[in-house]
Amino acid sequence: MSQVNVTINGEQIQAEKGLTILEAARGAGIYIPTLCHHEQLESYGSCRLCVVEIGAGERKKIVASCLYHISEGLVVETETEKINGFRRTILNLLMHRWDNIPAALLEKYAAKSNDRFIDNMTYCILCGLCVRYCHEVKGANVLGFIGRGTIRQVVIFPNQSAKHCATSCPDGMECLNFCPTGVISSQYYGKRPADGQTLPHAHPICINEDINILEVLERVGYV
Amino acid sequence: MSYSLAKVDQIIDGYGADKEALVQILLDIQHEFRWLSRETLLHTADRLGLPMNQLYNVTTFYKHFSLVPQGRHAVSVCVGTACHVRGATRLLDRVAQGFKLSPDETSADEKFSLKTVSCLGCCALGPVMVVDGKYMSNPTSNEIAKVVEECE
C-alpha cells in the first residue's frame, strides 16, 4: 500500500492511502472526539463531532473526518476555534436529549445547556450504532429506524427476524454494548408498552407478531 | 391477493429486481394500489433481498408513502405559506365540510382521502385544492359540492 504525507495540527504524518482523516489521526495519537464511530462499523457521519478543518488560507473547509479520505499533502486542523465552536453547538443540542454526556467532553468544549431548547430526554442520539451493528456485523436486521426529523427513532422488529436475533446473539443482545447513552438497555427494551402508556420518545419499541407497524407509527405520532 | 402480488412482481421485474430502484418501485406500487400494504412490503423485501426494517425506514421517511389504505380520489389542500396567507385554513374548512372528512382521513367507503400538502408550486392560484390531479383555485362551497358529486 502506498503511503501519503499529511499534516495534522502542524505535524507531518505518513499514513496509508485510503484511510480517513480520523483513522490517520488516531493512528498518530491525535485525539478527535466521536460518538457515532466504531472501528468495526462503516463510517456513518451522524454525530458530526469529528468535524475538522482542511486546506489552508482561503480554501479552508469543514469536513467530517470519519468520512473524508486523506490524500497527498492534505493539511488538517482538528482543534481550531471554529471547529470547537461547532462541537460546542452540537453538544449544546445533544444536552437536551441526553443529560449525562461524558463530562470530559462538555468541559473540553465548554458546552452549556440553553433555555431556548426544550428538554426531550430520549437518551437516543440517533447515532445508529445499534442499528448498524445489527445490520453490518450480525446481518440480523432486527433493529431499524422509522420516521424522520423529530420523530425519527429506533425500533425493534423481532417478528421479522426473531430467529436471527436469537441465533446471532445467543448470549443476549450485543448491540447493548454499543449504545453510547445506554438507552437501548433500558427497561423498555423488548417490552410492549401498556395501553395508554406514553413512551419516552425514542425508546425502542418491540414490534411483536401481534403488534402492527401502523399501531406503532400511530403511537409515535406518525400517522 | 394473488393477482395483486403478480402485479407487484411485474413492477419489480420492470426494474430488473434492482434494489437500488427501491424508491421508484415503491412509488409504482403505491401508484397501482394507492397504498403499501404489509403483504406488498414483505413481498417486495423478499424479491429485492432487502431486510424489512429498511423498507419501513424508507416508507416512513418519505411522507408520500402511505401505510394505510387511501381513497380512490385523492383530495389535497395546500397549506403552504402563500396559500396560508391567502386563506388556506378557510378553504380547508370548506373542503372538510364538503367531503365530510377531516385532514389525513379516508372515508369509510374508501372513496375520498383528504390530505394537506405544503406547496404545489402554483402559489399564484392559492389557496389551491387538487382533486385527482385537477387544480382548483379557491373553490367555493358550491364548486366543492359539484366536485363531490362528479366523483364516482
Image: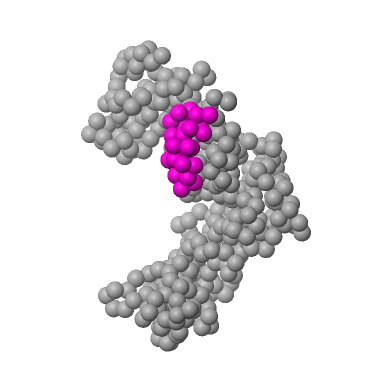
Question: Which residues are the magenta region?
Answer: B6-34
Task: Give me the residue at 54% from left, 72% from top.
Answer: A105
Most common SS among magenta residues: helix
Quick check: B117 above or below A96? Answer: above
Task: Give me the residue at 48% from left, 69% from top.
Answer: A66
User: A181 or A53, which is in the foreground?
Assistant: A53
Task: Give me the residue at 57% from left, 64% from top.
Answer: A41
Horizontal side of residue B52 vs A6, given as left or right: right
Horizontal side of residue A28 vs A80, given as left or right: right
Which residue in the rendered view is the most extreme toward the left? B124
Where residue A26 appears, x then y in whole percent? 53, 78
Quick check: B108 above or below B58? Answer: above
Q: Quadrant of residue A60?
A: bottom left
Quick check: A146 above or below B41? Answer: below
Where residue A96 appears, x then y in whole percent? 53, 58
Tag count: 0
Where residue A94 appears, x then y in whole percent? 52, 61
Task: Give me the residue at 35% from left, 35% from top.
Answer: B79
